[in-house]
Image (cartoon, grey):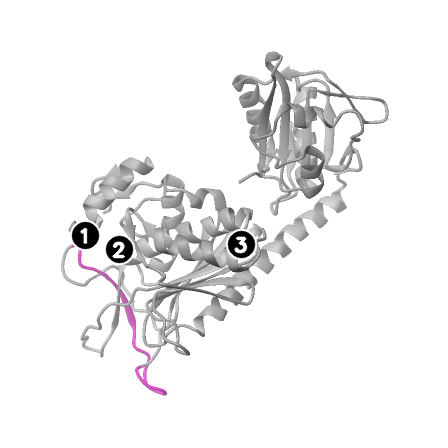
Amino acid sequence: MPPLRNRRLEQLLGGPIDETLTYAQVKGLIPNTTEGPDLDFKRDTYGRNDPERKKLCGDVGALANANGGLLILGMEEDDQGRAKKDFGVDISDGERIRLRQTVITNVQPPPTFEIIPVEDPDRDGTGFLVISVARTATAPHAYIQNKALLYPKRIGTETAWLSEAEVAEAYRARFAGFKDRIDEAARIEVDLLRRLASDEMFLVVTLVPDLPGRFTVDSAALSAFQLSNAGQPPAAFGMPVRSFVRSTVRHRRLVGAATYEANKPYSRGACELHENGSGVFATAVGGPRSGHPNGRQNLVDGPSLTVGICAALRFLARHACDRAAAGGLATIRATLWPVTSDFPGGPVVPVKLVSSVGEPNEELGTDAVTESPVADMVADVDDLCDDGPALVAATYRLASELFQAFGAPEVPAITPDGAVRLDFWYQHQRAHIVEWTKEAGVELRTRELS
């Protein structure tokens, strides 16, 4: 997904701001396009000394701290700030890596940006470098200079440095936005819970992107959703989790259901995918009940819970990125629901976390829960879209928080650095997992958990 979506700039360039940009499109900005709050021309690339490093980091950070925009290196401007001549700069891989590393090393938190080479067909290795900078929810971004933090911002056509009061206001906006996303995740979750069957136990995962996207719920969107549900059911670690056999819509959202009976709650699983890229995913995880000296207990299988969390993260992230073009970080929430009694007014039936990898229904923690546990985290949406160590590491974080509610310190089947511990999976799962780790570039480890 392109980091920057800007209708004005896309209209000026005649297309999306991504690797499909042509030299003719960028050169077409000459002679009538003027610099603005979201567009800056540079005749030359940035040098390697400290002043040039500060200029590069200041210009990128300034756009990230405003509304995003483009830096076009290799475009000479006139004294009115209008595109004048295609001067050209080095667009080699080495030059792009140097510029990227300079920004990543010296701007914190790192902004979301892309450096797009656009080669002059008449000059090999020379052309424009288009630095596309997205607005972010993690602003303010600071340039680190001699252990001091400087906060740039694009104001008009200039880069200015924020005052102390402006920096404080920017941080307040960041944290207020985070609180809003936490509240939104809880609201979306509750909205689905009241449509789930109360006699089944569900894992429910909700994702709210920091940078909302947009798609339109219409006949075409529903048709595409139906095809994706039929062809690619949610999966994790090489194993399908839940097929949505019914596809429909609700207000500004697509809905998938694992089963369907008219006017009855969702059974086995469901998802609701909102137009702005937010979404919620539910899959049944409750197993059979067991006898217990103090009464009956509901059992939740640990390996199945781990697979469900990973599948939910990947499914929701792909909706956010691919369907709604949302991006940035995302606020993510997970819970088990319902934890309830057998009959109104009766005692709550405790829920126990177990695994039968060794002994049948071996307890993974020290405690049973008597209310719905909640886990939350923040993760990069792009990291969750593709199979790989980043997705596994995110699954570890969210799953471990749920496991800790049961008195288990962490999820045993995966690691915090995104590897898989094969010994903690069921025998029938292992062949799928081995094949998946090879394809996904995920490390496979033998037993190491004490």
Identified at 40% across, 77% down, the residue is: 262
> Chief secondary structure of the magenta span?
loop
Identified at 72% across, 35% down, the residue is: 12
Residue 60, image quadrant: top right
The reply to whether callout 1 and callout 2 are in contact (CB within 8 Å) is yes
Task: Report the disc number at residue 277.
Answer: 3
Kind of residue at badge 1: Tyr
The reply to whether callout 1 and callout 3 are in contact (CB within 8 Å) is no
Q: Does residue 376 sit above or below 37 in this rendering?
A: below
In the image, farthest residue toward the bottom: 345
Q: Is residue 150 left or right of residue 36?
A: left
| Residue range corresponding to the magenta coloring | 342-357
> Disc 3 to disc 2, how far (Cα)?
28 Å
Query: Is residue 347 part of the magenta span, yes or no?
Result: yes
Say which residue label 2 marks.
Answer: 303
Is residue 18 something that shows in the picture? yes
Q: Does residue 169 sit above or below 369 in this rendering?
A: above
Is disc 3 placed on a helix, strand or loop?
loop
Q: In this view, does 318 lie to the left or right of 445?
A: right
Say which residue label 1 marks.
Answer: 426
Task: Report the disc number at residue 268.
Answer: none
